[in-house]
Amino acid sequence: MPGSSTHSPARIAVDLRLVGKPGIGHYATQLFAAVLDLDTHNHYVFIAPRGWNDKRFRRANATVLETSMRYYSIQEQVLMPVLLKRKGIDLFHSPHFLLQVILPCKSVVSILDAIYLTFPDDLRNPVARAYYEVAFRVGAWRSDRIITISNFSKAEIIRTVGVDPKRIAVTQLAAARNFHPVSDDHKLMEARAALSLPPRYFLYIGIQRHRKNIPRIILAFHQLLQAGDCGHHLVLAGKSDPRYRHIPELVERLGIGDRVHFVGYVTDEMLPALYSLADALVFPSLYEGFGLPVLEAMACGTPVITSNSTCLPEVAGDAALLVDPTDTSAIVNAMRRILTDQEGIERLRRLGFARAKNFSWEMTARQTLEVYRDVLN
């Protein structure tokens, strides 16, 4: 691997301009904190936004270079190659799908999914949609290697762009170390008060997008309430989006506003308590590149209901209730099992703990370093 003392140190630059953003930002910070734990030989230059400060990146072999260079701009196409050449970079890794057309060094790009090629309407701005489609293909074709996060995403990249499968490495994600069952009553009470959580609830965590299938979760919960055998509530966590007003409007139209709670964005520090207090995570997504909430819930001992399609069976294995995400009645039946099958719930908890332990950021980092080694050689 690149960290071996038998190789002369390489200078590796990483584009961290999206740190702090959900998704890509989380992936990048977790991955490179783990990379720095493993690789003390090579020198890393982290290109980050001004004011960013993360103590995990204060290492003898790491430099944080603050910049105001904008993403998705002509500016970055010109300035990034100049910066890399000036710093004597041997390898440049973009954890986002975007890569500059001209580079003075070897390159690796992370393409986590092909979501916006499959669901283009998630990008409402036609200019942004056109830019994405071009940039996605440039990143895939221009890079020396592609890293993705599931075998499903690998197949999607091949399907949509047609690159050689040998150029794509799969490095799966993991729940962060702070995800574990929370038993501290003070932390649980703090989360319950801060988020106004009901006593018993099903949980969804994620952004509001068509592919997340939130209306079908709400319809399934409504059917469960109509059957009269559910004292639970539904908690929907994630930043609200004015483009998806039909989601809260559906709740009001069904007359279940007192049983459905929109709690907004939840910090990483509070998420383990939110999972631990839930009776189940309901995550029947139509399309995912990986589906990290599934592993986070399992690591916290929370039973999981998720889709039997895209990457989600690959992540969940036999440790979740898998349902057809287009079949509302299947989601209802899985939620009912959570209410009635205590033995099955305990089995899901045990399997979930074991499943989550199969994934680690250390493993992801080792696999990433292997890619670096191959490219540099």
Image: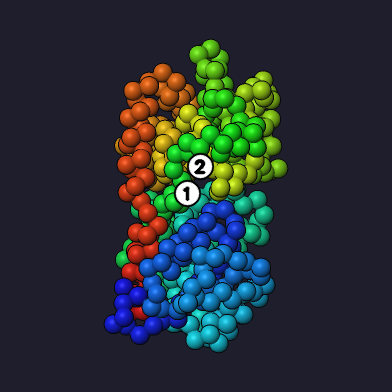
Q: Residue at x 33, y 43 (%)?
A: 355
Q: For the residues marked 1 and 2, what is the alpha-carbon distance in whole angstroms?
A: 7 Å
Is any atom of residue 232 visible in this view? yes
Along the line of sight, which residue is nearer the eye, 199 or 234? 199
Q: Which residue is mark 2?
A: 272
Query: Mark 2 packing: few (<14 Cα in 10 Å), some, or many (20+)?
Result: many
Is any atom of residue 333 visible in this view? no
Q: Which quadrant does the N terminus fall into?
A: bottom left
- Image position of 157 (left or right of 100): left
Q: Which mark is residue 178?
A: 1
Q: Residue at x 55, y 87 (%)?
A: 86
Q: Which mark is residue 337?
A: none
Residue 139 position within the rendered picture, expressed as x and y whole percent measured from the top left: 49, 68
Residue 342, image quadrant: top left
Badge 2 element: helix
Identify the mark nearer the N-term, 1 or 2.
Answer: 1
Badge 1 element: loop
- Image position of 143 (left or right of 251): left
Kindly identify the amino acid type of the residue bearing the numbered disc 2: Pro
Identity of the residue furthest to the left in this view: 6
Q: Residue at x 41, y 81 (%)?
A: 10
Identity of the residue furthest to the top in this view: 228
Q: Are marks 1 and 2 in contact (CB under 8 Å)?
A: yes
Along the line of sight, which residue is nearer the eye, 107 or 137? 107
Along the line of sight, which residue is nearer the eye, 65 or 286? 65
Relative to 86, is 308 above or below? Answer: above
Relative to 229, is 356 above or below? Answer: below
Kindly identify the amino acid type of the residue bearing the numbered disc 1: Asn
Q: Residue at x 41, y 66 (%)?
A: 37
Q: Which quadrant does the C terminus fall into?
A: bottom left
